[in-house]
Amino acid sequence: MITEIRHKNFKALRDATLPLGRFTLIVGANGTGKTTALKALSQIEEIDKTGIENDLTKGLNEEKNQIQIEVFWDTFSHRRTVLTDQPPVNHHLDKNQNILGGSSGSFANSLDWTYGYKSEGDALRRFRVFAFDAEKIAEATTLKANVEIESDGKIWLEFYGEYKVQNRKYLTS
């Protein structure tokens, strides 16, 4: 299980650590970096030197023009470093932050192919960020009922709205 994510110079997160548990609820005011903290993990493969200007924290000194995202598990961590003038590098570290090795290329692939952490690499590939649009959630919508009779004579109602969410209910006779 991922225990924390550290961000350095990624968008608004100049130096931030996000501790994680089995269930982590992230709340806060708009514009404080909640989505950015999670998107770093879901976009870690796409962060490279070609688009670093879009992801790098604005207003840094020239010598700090690098992004680091480090993902921690119980016994090790894996860090991706992106510089403006070099390809991204992935470093594998023990729990005391000693570098055990490095590789280029895919962050998730280096976890399982190079270091044998297949389940961790697969988990990163499946990671997704879902955010709710508060205005859409609060928006009223009308439900319409569609009544149909099936070939076996059962009658069912299908409720659907603007988002095509379906809920079928059989009527009893």
Image: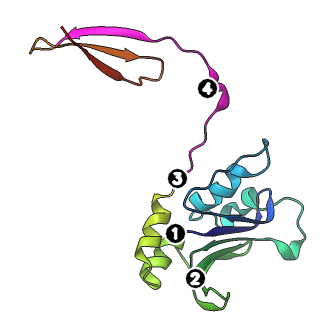
- From the viewer's side, name the closer residue of 89 and 99: 99
Q: Are marks 4 and 2 in contact (CB under 8 Å)?
A: no
Magenta extent: 129-149
Q: Which labelled disc corresponds to residue 161?
A: none
Q: Earlier in the sequence, mark 4 or mark 2?
A: 2
Circle 3 residues within 10 Å: few <14, some 14–19, many ≥20:
few
Instruction: Describe the colour scheme in one phrase.
Output: rainbow
Q: Amino acid at mark 3?
A: Arg
Looking at the image, residue 31 lies above or below residue 152: below
Mark 1 lies on residue: 1
- From the viewer's side, name the closer residue of 48 and 23: 23
Q: Earlier in the sequence, mark 1 or mark 2?
A: 1
Mark 2 lies on residue: 76
Q: Amino acid at mark 2?
A: Phe
Q: Element under label 3?
A: loop
Q: Earlier in the sequence, mark 1 or mark 3?
A: 1
- Distance, label 1 to label 3, CA atoms, is 15 Å
- Distance, label 2 to label 3, CA atoms, is 22 Å
Q: Earlier in the sequence, mark 4 or mark 1?
A: 1
Q: Element under label 1?
A: loop
Q: Is residue 7 left or right of residue 163?
A: right
Mark 4 lies on residue: 136
Q: Are marks 4 and 1 in contact (CB under 8 Å)?
A: no
- Distance, label 4 to label 1, CA atoms, is 32 Å
